[in-house]
Amino acid sequence: MPELPEVETSRRFIEPVLTGQRMGLVEVRRPRMARRNVRPEDVAERLSGRRVRRVGRRGKFILIDVEGELTWVIHLGMSGRLQIAEPGETEAPHTNAIFQTESGTELRFVDPRTFGFVAVFTPDELTGSGLSRVGRDALTDLPTVDEFAETFAGRVPAIKSALLDQRFVAGLGNIYADEVLHLARIHPARRIGSLDREEIARLRNAIVPVLEAGVAHGGTSLNDLAYLLPDGRAGQFLERLGAYGREGEPCRTCGTAIERMVIAQRSSHFCPMCQRLAD
């Protein structure tokens, strides 16, 4: 958390603020936030004075093209969020980085746990970074049914674990993997190699609608409000979740109580009636 819908929502908010703007003052207050660069100072030195060309995304990474063939990378980690503010506005606690545009508007990176990061990479550095191992985007570049089937064939990990593997498909996390499996009527503990073609098609066909719904409602802000939209509002998808976090509550499809189990040290929520374990 945040996952693809939260990151895409954040990207859409910051895109008009940054695109075409020349970056001014850049302040990274905690070197840990710039740990992916060899020199933490590179973030400020490489960004200041350069113009933003495009604000994109891959999986859970915001990728910003900056003049000079540089890529500004933002990853929100477990508790990070972006905030759009004007100079002098009260700062939220744990504001660890501030990026000011030439117009004066500030993009602030708030992250209490500092698992998130910012980086500015040259093309060679980007190729050598962990981003080179990130799979195809779950919203915009989903593998075909045949590609899913080829990847799944003969493999034994649980489907929930496979969906969380960012090398396989990028952007799904614990919340939306549970939602996808619930919509597809597949038990999270099913071995991926046991899924037949019809089940794989159901799985694939569930991914984009779930993610699009998450984006349409601004993502999921849990009760701790660790994730907020850049304008300070909470995402509204929490009340529309079908499985995640609803242990003991009735399934919205059949009324059976949602159950929870642990798979690979991650909680998984599912309906035992709609998502039968027929492995």
Image (spheres, rainbow, N blue to C red):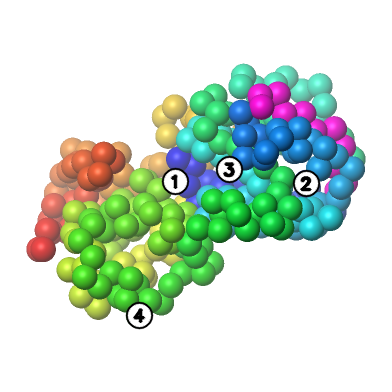
In this view, 202 is above or below 186: below
Q: Nearer the viewer, residue 6 or 171?
A: 171
Mark 1 or mark 4, earlier in chain: 4
Q: Amino acid at mark 2?
A: Val
Mark 3 or mark 1, earlier in chain: 3
Kindly state the secondary structure of the residue where label 2 is placed: helix
Mark 4 or mark 2, earlier in chain: 2
Look at the numbered discs 4 and 2 and tell me whether their residues touch, using CB distance below 8 Å.
no
Task: From the top left corner, tell me how far across and down residue 174 is, in percent.
Answer: 36, 46
Query: Where, quadrant-wise, is the C terminus in this rendering?
Result: bottom left
> Does the magenta portion include 28?
yes
Mark 3 or mark 2, earlier in chain: 2
The magenta span reads: 21-31
Q: Nearer the viewer, mark 3 or mark 1?
A: 3
> Does the magenta portion include 129?
no
Q: Nearer the viewer, mark 3 or mark 2?
A: 3
Q: Amino acid at mark 4?
A: Asp
Give how far apart the Cα atoms at labels 3 and 2 are.
Answer: 18 Å
Mark 2 or mark 1, earlier in chain: 2
- The residue at which mark 4 appears reads as 146
Task: From the top left corner, tell me how far across and down residue 109 is, in percent.
Answer: 65, 33
Q: Inspect this view and state whether residue 14 appears.
A: no
Which residue is drawn at the image coordinates 28% and 69% (left, top)? 152
Which residue is drawn at the image coordinates 43% and 72% (left, top)? 143
- The residue at which mark 2 appears reads as 17
Look at the numbered discs 3 and 1 and tell me whether their residues touch, using CB distance below 8 Å.
no
- The residue at which mark 1 appears reads as 237
Which residue is drawn at the image coordinates 23% and 57% (left, top)? 157
Give how far apart the Cα atoms at labels 4 and 3 are.
Answer: 31 Å
